[in-house]
Image (cartoon, helix red, strand yellow):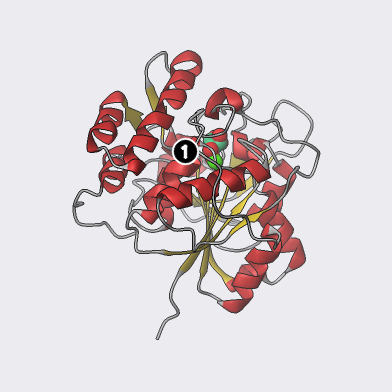
Amino acid sequence: MAPKQTLIVDCDTGIDDALALLYLLGGSGVEIGAVTTVSGNTDAETAALNTLRVLELARRTDIPVSVGARSNWCGDVPLAPHVHGSDGLGNTDLPAPTTAPSPEPAAELIVRLARRNPGALRLLAIGPLTNLATALLLEPDLPELVEHVTIMGGAVRHPGNATPAAEANIHNDPEAARIVLRAGWPVTLVPLDATMGELLTEQHQRRLAERGSPTTLFTSSILDQYFDFYERDIFGERRAACHDPLAAAIAVGDVAPVLAPVVATDVDTGDGPGRGATVADVRGQYRGFPEQQGANVRVVLETERTFPDLLVDRLCGAPEPTRRAA
Ligand code: BDR
Ligand code: CA
């Protein structure tokens, strides 16, 4: 019998990280073996506490949460309270969790679970890639032990959001991202090209509020802060991108990308204006992306742009249309 698939979510919880976790816990059918945290939207400890809060809301305090890298390979990560609120969860000030993070460091936990379930572990990274790179250094055979890695990060044919060229998760630790992309394991990258087309609106927020469950009231209220940021700094309107939830849905096969070529992809680790940019060879775009030498990453360039409805259905516990295969 094939071993049961287990997913580790590595995140920097974070408004959209919280949405991704609640989406996965709302009925994806996948077993979440652990959640590991990294500094990004907030520091790694706060991200772990936020994750525990979210798991408590979903009544899944059985899932271990482990704290990972506090700083990236080049120093401290600039946190993002202007995007996610001073508590990382939209200033919702949820009470302190009743459970505590596991004492095992994140990278060690990833390696231990991979060794325990060879070939049956999937990784979903929705924060900077520091923990995954550290795990690769601890266990050089990790690529053979892990079935698949899905990463929310990068900007290929789309401008960056941390700098003109770089997306935040990659920009917060370009050296780690380079190690992860070059590791020789199957990687799906879900960049801004896809996530900036999947937009939550005030209509979605209203549906969540009207459903009135603890989870939907929470998700509706964290969207206030997210919409404030997107209105002020990005769109001039109250709507927001589904970065991490979209990556989660792709990782578990709920969303099939419309365009996702496998192409040679690397990260700019220089000191110039391109630092942290994902450089993917999409020159074949006019010829249907013919097979390419050195192709190492499946890059999701387009999705159907209907995912926010599925996300809200899932959070509301509504029956969903038939699932599409990956
Ligand atoms: C990514 O950066 C973080 O702010 C979000 O949680 C997401 O993972 C988007 O660039
Ligand atoms: Ca994130």
The front one of 141 and 291 is 141
Q: How many marks?
A: 1
Q: Quadrant of the C terminus?
A: bottom left
Residue 255 in percent (x, y) is at 33, 51
Q: Give x and y (percent) for residue 317.
A: 25, 49
**Ligand 1 within 8 A of label 1's CB?**
yes
Q: Quadrant of ligand 2?
A: top right
Q: Is residue 177 visible?
A: yes
Q: Quadrant of the N terminus?
A: bottom left
User: Is 239 drawn above or below residue 290 in the view shown?
Assistant: above
Q: Is residue 9 above or below residue 232?
A: below
Residue plotted at (35% across, 43% down): 215
Q: Relative to 254, does residue 93 appear above or below in the rendering?
A: above
109 horizontally vs 232: left or right: right
The picture places residue 161, in percent across and down from the top left corner, at 56, 27
Q: Amino acid at mark 1?
A: Asp
Nearer to the camera, 206 or 53: 53
Q: Tell me which residue sits at (54%, 29%) in the image.
A: 84
Where residue 141 appears, as percent x and y from the top left, is 69, 72
Picture residue at 69% right of the left edge, 52% below the top = 68
Q: Is residue 318 above or below residue 160?
A: below
Tell whether 103 sits left or right of 195. Answer: right
When asked about the image quadrant of residue 304, the answer is top left
Find numbered disc 1 in the image and state the secondary structure of the residue it sits on: helix
Is disc 1 surrounded by few (<14), some (14 to 19) or many (20+) residues within 10 Å? many
Q: Is residue 182 visible?
A: no
Please name whichever residue, 129 or 78, is drawn nearer the observer in this view of the structure. 78
Label 1, on which residue? 16
